[in-house]
Image (spheres, rainbow, N blue to C red):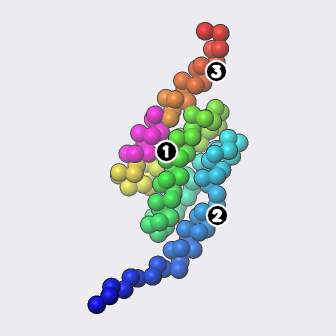
Amino acid sequence: MPVRRRAPRPQDTGVVKRYAEMGIAAALSRPWDYPTACRELAELLRHGYAGLPKPAQALAAADVLVAFRLLPDVQTEYALAAANGLLLAVETSLPKQKKSQAVSEFKCSVILHKRRAKVQQEPGM
């Protein structure tokens, strides 16, 4: 007897498609859009993460990690402030395992950010 697989819900694929169309991952890679993308992602986590389907939640969690990994490359205080806001949203909305992974990634990124800022500040040494 063949096994029938359940077709994905049309609304789930629509949400994932709309999330991908938002272009948060692409905006994170542009230094001038990084703070805005972090703020949008933080608002999405605070207000809509629990209601998202699982595939969209996975995309949002992946974008959080991308945001923290790209932080050292964006050398502005606005980016650091936006990443701090994103961290606060992560701590309130993500599940325990994803939260701990994001927090450790954030800590490493902040250390790299500060080291790079220090090197740029003291070029004569």
Residue 8 picture location, percent across and down = 47, 78
In percent of width and height, residue 34 lies at 64, 44
Is residue 104 rendered magenta in the image? yes
| Picture residue at 40% right of the left edge, 82% below the top | 6
- The amino acid pointed to by label 2 is Glu
Residue 46 in view (yes/no): no
User: At label 3, which amino acid type do we have?
Assistant: Gln
Above or below — where is 103 with respect to 116?
A: below
Front: mark 3 or 1:
3
* Circle 1 SS class: helix
95 vs 81, left or right, is left
The N terminus - image quarter: bottom left
Neighbour class for label 2 at 10 Å: few (<14), some, many (≥20)?
Answer: few
Q: Give the quadrant of residue 43.
A: bottom right
State left or right for residue 7 relative to residue 122: left
- Residue picked out by circle 2: 21
Residue under label 1, please give it: 87
Point 51% across, 49% down: residue: 64
Q: Number of marks in the image?
A: 3
Magenta part of the chain: 100-108
